[in-house]
Image (tube, grey):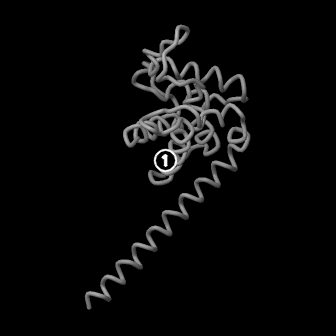
Amino acid sequence: MAERNAKQRTVRQARRWQRKMERFRERQRQIRTNAADILESGNFRRTRGYIQHGNVTVNAHVMNVARYSIALSESLHIPCSRRELIRGALLHDYFLYDWHIPDQANPHRLHGFYHPGVALRNASREYDLTEKERNIIRRHMWPLTVVPPTCREAWIVTAADKWCSLME
């Protein structure tokens, strides 16, 4: 009897992991479909070399934020532009420097307050951003950025960013 229960638990656990992996793959597919140009960008690849939180790179962080943003919008049934949500999530921390290493030009003491503007400038130089994507990037640090987000996509990315930062 105990052996049978253990086997059933193992089967249930395997099914749960399989569903989780399928959701992960589907979110990855959505990211690739909606943001192939960003993922292939040399500057975006550079984010693999900068640490964001703990030992997590900026690249890993923004990919996590994109996946959690998709998950949040799906689980809460929030209608939004999936493309703008994903692209904004990938570019929200596009500041392209290591904020842990201060230098003369960029002391980075107030990184949390001013990096959304730097990220928006960098992203705007490289991509044609929609107003929602701009709002996501500019306002994702709310309440540090005093003006709150003004679209659903920006609120979702802001929440996902806070969650991912906490977990990292």
Q: Is residue 53 left or right of residue 34?
A: left
What residue sits 30% from the left and 88% below the top? Answer: 3
| Residue situated in front as seen by the camera: 84 or 160 | 160
What residue sits 68% from the left and 41% below the top? Answer: 39
Residue 61's x, y, as percent?
51, 39
In the displayed structure, 59 sits above or below 75; it is above
Kind of residue indicated by mark 1: Tyr
Residue 54: quarter of image: top left
Residue linked to disc 1 = 68
| Residue situated in front as seen by the camera: 149 or 142 | 142
Q: Is residue 134 left or right of residue 155?
A: right
Residue 150's x, y, as percent?
51, 28
Residue lying furthest bottom in this view? 1
Picture quarter with the N terminus: bottom left
In the displayed structure, 11 sits above or below 100; it is below
Dot 1 lies on which element?
A: helix
| Residue situated in front as seen by the camera: 134 or 8 | 8
Residue 82: quarter of image: top right
Q: Is residue 8 left or right of residue 79?
A: left
Picture quarter with the C terminus: top left
